[in-house]
Every structure is written in structure tokens, then in C-alpha cells.
């Protein structure tokens, strides 16, 4: 919290991996419906959330992302049947790993947003931006 | 239906279920369970003597929608294709109590076979059309309509049996007391366009309700009150039909029928609001017809998992694109027809089914299929043959080759990239979604906002 008080103008940069079928479409629909979602989110389209390897998440942090958001289809609704099952198992492990290397695990969030859930996309992104804003810039966290 | 049954290139497998699908576009293999109907189809001539002689009668909740009875050995409906009866083993006296066998004695060709077992067939097919139809929403779920509490509160489907010449009343529209009704109410949108049930418009109910109003006027001369929210006469000549029914003297009340009350004398009071008058109205009637919603077939969960189909949030099978690819699914070679994909009426179903059949034929005539270029490829020099990708692939598209290394079958691969993220050796590349491409996007976006 201190950091956010020190840096009132800090705008976190969030790399968001969106699966092509659910979450990317959900983000699209949020735009079509003129819903507000933060511009801090930098969307990267992948075919399936199962494509997001731990290396990708770490690479995004290394390149300076303050937070990484992984969004996929709801369990049971994956376009690729079970691709998101892998994601569901993988991302908690990556969160653990982040702790070891001195990055707050809360900088990585996994959630499920279907193509019909434009309001949820707007909600999740807003909430995550505020979470990361409170955590402050990643450069300072690593420097500590 | 008869034409399909007689066509030399069509094999009809009725009373059968697909249990498993493997393979890929052009090379599917289907395991089909042909259930035992306890009648030898090769010997049966369809004379119907067994059905006539069978002493056991049960309520027909299938074709007769609970309005009539059928025998334990029965044809599902008149002129069914194939014209072969089936024994309902849960109702048959021989199967439940071990004695009777009247059908066997009465059958002139000796076609009854109590020992018949389910058969498993493995069939190779090039394309699959899923046309599993719809289910009916059960109005018991909204208690304000009092469905099930009075025999004179019926669904639209039950009304169809009443007005059918082959139905339990021989086509006479009668109340449960056997009298001609003097006043009939029809309530639209029961279970559809309702946040407490299905939110979608069920599409067919407006027109069948208008037809039923016409039939009531025509056959009984009773007064008809139609409670509707919007009249969706969407098809060719439908609006004209709506006007005709208006001219026939049907009273249209714009507003949702809110409640059906059973009065002490057994009459039914339908309450609702009339949005045009801006006040509450009520009608005391002898019969209430609920235009219940159609909904995804109750088997949809199983069918979706067997065929690997996606579903829209309301439960219908998902098409590849709602406007541009309405009959294809996300799986190449599997097509949708009719209400399996969403509510539609008969002409639209015929058109949709024709499109699905033609898509399949078009694919065969081309002799080759175009697949998406976003597939995974394995770098044979880097693969260590651990097999992690084989486990991770949702489509069993990866197998070990002769060298013990992983190899992707591009016809089966859908390009999800799960194997790419799983491979510990980094030996798999997702074409058009390579690590380099994604990293370049990350770096590019972060550089832009730095």
C-alpha cells in the first residue's frame, strides 16, 4: 500500500494471455458492448490457455510486466476439451515458483471468462489492475 | 422418412446409440449400440398382431405425451420407419413376471425373440451429422402455471395429440371430462423468454399456438384467449396466418399469462396483465394450453462428450460461426442439423439439414480437406521421446513414430498448443503461435507502453 501512496500515478502494465475461443471473444464482446475495461491490460491471443507455458509467464515478468493475467474457458467448456485442465494445474505451480524468485505470487492471476461473459472480463481486469497497482512496480519489488 | 428407409444408399439404424467416436475427418470410426428390440427385424412383416393381442397397457409418455396408452409391445407411432415393433422390457409381463408370451404365440412369422441381445457395430464413416433434436421444458418447474394439478392444463405437445385424428380422442378437442370446451386459454412463452427458466426465444411456439387457436375455433367454436408478450410471426406467410386467426375471432391479450388458478368447481382462472389496456385481466376457462419452450435434448451432455461438441451457454450445440458457418462444428467433419443447434421450425430445419448434408457431400467430392495451418510440429532432433505430449493432447493427435519420438498427425491436431507448453525439451512448435512470435508480442506491447 505504501508504494501506491508514494506513486499515485503508477499505472501497472499487465500482460494478459487470452484464449482464442472464450476469453479473447469475451474481451471482444466487452468492447462491442462498450464496457469499460482498463487500458493497462495488454492482450496476447493464444489458441488455448494450455499454450501458456511457465516460461511465457516468466518471460513477461522479465520484460517488465507488473502483472500477468491468464484467462481461459471455464472448466468443462474448453474448446480443446481439456487444454484448460493443464492450465488449472500449471498456474498454481508457477505462482509458487514466483515466490521463490522474489516476485509476489499475486502478480499472476488465473481466471475463467467465457465468450458470453463480457461483464466478467471487465470486472476481472479492473480488479486485477487494482491488485497490481497496490503491489507497486515490479522493478522496485525485484530491487528490494 | 419412408424414402430414407427405402433408399439403397441409406442404412437406417433406429433404436441405436453411438457410444464412441474415434478418428478424424474422412476417417471416423463409430461404435454403435443397436439395442435389442426383442423382435427379429428380418422375420417381422409389421402386421401388428402382437400389439393387438398384448394384454399389457401402459401410459405412453413418448409419442402420446401422456395423453394415451400403448401396449408393452408397440410401434412407437403409426407409420414408424422401420415398421417393426419393440418390446418395452420394463413393462412386458414376460420380462417382469416370467409368463405370458402371447405375442410369441400370436406372431405369424415367429419373429418374437425374447433372448435378443444388444449388438455392437463398428462403422467407418467420413462425416457425421448430429441431428439429435430437442427436449421439452417441463412446466412443473414454474408452479404458478399449476401444471400437473388439473388434467385440463396441458402443454402444446399434448394438445397436438388431442387434435390428431390418430390421437386418444380421435381428433376431437375435449376436456378431461369428455366435454367440448367452451373457453380455452393459450399462454405463450412458458419457460422461454423468462429469466427464471430459459432466456432465449423458443421460436416455434407463437406459430403453433396460433395454429392451435385456429383448430379450437374450427373444431369446437370455443372462445380462445391468447396471452402473448410479442407475436413472432417471422416466416413466409406467417404474418398472414396471424391476421387470419385474428379475423376468426380469437381474443389476443398482450402480456404474459402470470398465473393459472384452479377454482373450486374445477374451472381454471388465467390471470395476467394486459399491457395494451394497462391493467390486470383474468379469464375463466375450461382448458389451458401452455406453449412450453423447447430446450436442448436431455442427452446433450453425453452427446457433446462423445462427439467432442462445444455448447453455447443455453446448452445447444455450438456451430463454428453463428453467421458464416452455421452447420459446421469446431471439429472438422462433424456437422449439425436442426434443433440440435438451436430452436427452429420445420422449414428452417429442412433447410439446415439440407445444408449439413451438402457440406458433407461437398467435402467428399473434393477428395481432400483443408485444415487450419495452426498445428503443432515436433522437432525430431530435439524430441527425447518422453511421451508427456501424448498424455497432454486432448485429441490423441500425437503418437510415437518408429524412432520412438513424438509425431503430430496434422489432420487430428487442432492447434491448441497444450503440448507445446508441456514439452520439457521445448521440441514442439505451434505454427503461427511460436514462442518467438508470442515473446515478440510481449516485448512489443511492453515497449510501446514503457
Image (cartoon, rainbow, N blue to C red):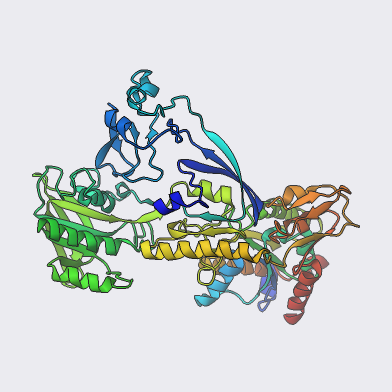
Can you give x and y, in whole percent of width and height, for residue A120 in the image?
Answer: 53, 65
Vertical arrangement, residue A133 with respect to residue B43, above or below: below
Report the front residue among B128 and B339: B128
Report the front residue among A23 and B34: B34
Q: Is residue A142 left or right of residue B72?
A: right
Q: Residue at x 88, y 57 (%)?
A: B380
Res B312 seen here: yes
Q: Residue at x 12, y 47 (%)?
A: B263
Report the front residue among A128 and B390: B390
The tally of labels here is 0
Q: Quadrant of residue A131?
A: bottom right
Vertical arrangement, residue A51 with respect to residue B139, above or below: below
Report the front residue among B232 and B160: B160
Can you give x and y, in whole percent of width and height, for residue A32 in the image?
Answer: 52, 76
Q: Quadrant of residue B104?
A: top left
Q: Is residue B379 left or right of residue B365?
A: right
Q: Residue at x 62, y 61 (%)?
A: B364
**Quadrant occupied by the C terminus of chain B:** bottom right
Can you give x and y, in whole percent of width and height, for residue B441 in the image?
Answer: 75, 74
Name the residue at the right extreme: B381
Vertical arrangement, residue B210 with respect to residue B392, above or below: below
Res A99 seen here: no
Can you give x and y, in whole percent of width and height, for residue B5 in the image?
Answer: 44, 49
Amino acid at each position: 500500500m505504501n508504494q501506491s501512496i508514494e506513486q499515485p500515478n503508477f499505472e501497472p502494465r499487465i500482460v494478459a494471455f487470452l484464449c482464442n475461443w472464450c476469453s479473447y471473444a469475451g474481451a471482444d464482446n466487452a468492447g462491442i458492448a462498450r464496457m469499460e475495461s482498463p487500458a493497462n491490460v495488454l492482450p496476447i491471443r493464444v489458441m488455448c490457455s494450455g499454450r501458456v507455458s511457465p516460461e511465457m509467464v516468466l518471460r513477461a515478468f522479465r520484460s517488465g510486466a507488473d502483472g500477468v493475467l491468464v484467462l481461459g474457458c471455464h472448466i468443462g467448456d474448453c474448446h480443446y476439451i481439456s487444454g484448460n485442465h493443464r492450465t488449472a494445474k500449471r498456474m498454481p505451480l508457477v505462482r509458487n515458483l514466483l515466490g521463490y524468485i522474489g516476485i509476489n505470487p499475486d502478480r499472476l492471476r488465473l481466471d475463467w471468462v467465457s465468450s458470453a461473459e463480457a461483464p466478467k472480463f471487465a470486472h476481472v481486469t479492473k480488479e486485477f489492475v487494482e491488485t497490481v497497482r497496490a503491489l507497486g512496480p515490479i522493478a522496485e519489488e525485484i530491487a528490494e | 422418412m419412408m424414402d430414407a428407409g427405402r433408399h439403397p444408399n441409406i442404412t437406417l439404424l433406429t433404436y441405436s446409440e453411438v457410444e464412441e467416436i474415434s478418428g478424424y475427418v474422412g476417417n471416423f470410426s463409430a461404435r454403435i449400440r443397436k439395442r435389442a428390440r426383442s423382435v427379429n427385424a428380418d422375420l417381422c412383416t409389421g402386421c401388428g398382431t402382437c400389439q393387438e393381442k398384448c394384454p399389457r397397457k401402459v401410459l405412453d409418455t413418448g409419442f402420446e405425451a401422456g395423453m394415451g396408452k400403448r401396449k408393452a409391445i408397440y410401434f412407437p407411432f403409426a407409420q414408424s420407419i422401420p415398421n417393426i415393433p419393440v418390446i418395452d422390457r420394463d413393462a412386458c409381463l414376460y420380462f417382469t413376471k416370467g409368463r405370458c408370451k402371447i405375442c410369441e404365440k400370436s406372431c405369424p412369422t415367429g419373429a418374437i425373440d425374447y433372448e435378443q441381445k444388444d449388438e455392437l457395430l463398428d462403422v467407418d464413416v467420413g462425416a457425421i451429422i448430429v441431428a439429435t433434436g430437442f427436449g421439452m421444458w417441463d412446466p412443473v418447474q414454474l408452479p404458478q402455471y399449476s401444471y400437473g394439478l388439473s388434467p385440463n392444463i396441458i402443454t402444446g405437445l399434448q394438445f397436438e395429440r388431442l387434435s390428431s385424428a390418430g390421437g386418444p380422442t380421435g381428433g376431437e378437442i375435449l376436456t378431461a371430462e369428455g366435454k367440448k370446451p367452451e373457453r380455452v386459454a393459450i399462454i405463450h412463452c412458458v419457460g422461454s423468454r423468462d429469466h427464471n427458466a430459459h432466456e432465449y426465444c423458443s421460436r416455434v411456439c407463437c406459430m403453433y399456438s396460433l395454429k392451435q387457436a385456429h383448430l379450437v375455433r374450427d373444431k369446437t367454436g370455443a372462445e380462445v384467449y391468447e396471452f402473448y408478450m410479442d407475436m413472432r410471426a417471422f416466416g413466409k406467410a406467417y404474418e398472414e396466418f396471424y391476421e387470419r386467426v385474428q379475423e376468426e375471432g380469437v381474443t389476443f391479450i398482450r402480456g404474459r399469462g402470470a398465473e393459472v388458478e384452479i377454482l373450486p368447481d374445477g374451472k381454471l382462472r388465467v390471470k395476467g396483465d394486459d399491457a395494451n389496456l394497462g391493467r390486470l385481466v383474468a379469464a375463466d376457462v375450461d382448458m389451458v394450453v401452455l406453449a412450453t419452450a423447447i430446450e436442448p435434448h436431455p442427452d446433450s451432455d453425453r452427446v457433446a462428450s462423445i462427439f467432442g461438441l462445444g455448447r453455447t451457454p443455453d446448452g445447444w450445440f455450438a456451430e463454428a460461426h453463428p453467421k458464416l458457418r452455421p452447420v459446421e462444428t469446431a471439429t472438422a467433419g462433424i456437422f449439425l442439423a436442426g434443433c440440435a443447434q438451436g430452436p427452429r421450425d420445420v422449414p428452417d430445419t429442412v433447410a439446415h439439414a439440407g445444408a449439413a448434408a451438402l457440406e458433407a457431400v461437398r467435402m467428399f467430392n473434393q477428395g481432400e480437406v483443408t485444415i487450419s495451418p495452426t498445428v503443432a510440429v515436433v522437432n525430431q532432433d530435439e524430441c527425447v521421446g518422453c511421451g508427456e505430449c501424448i498424455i497432454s493432447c486432448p485429441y490423441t493427435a500425437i503418437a510415437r513414430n518408429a524412432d520412438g519420438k513424438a509425431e503430430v498427425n496434422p489432420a487430428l491436431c487442432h492447434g491448441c498448443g497444450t503440448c507445446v507448453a508441456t514439452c520439457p525439451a521445448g521440441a514442439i512448435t505451434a505454427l503461427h503461435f511460436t514462442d518467438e512470435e508470442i515473446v515478440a508480442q510481449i516485448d512489443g506491447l511492453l515497449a510501446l507502453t514503457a
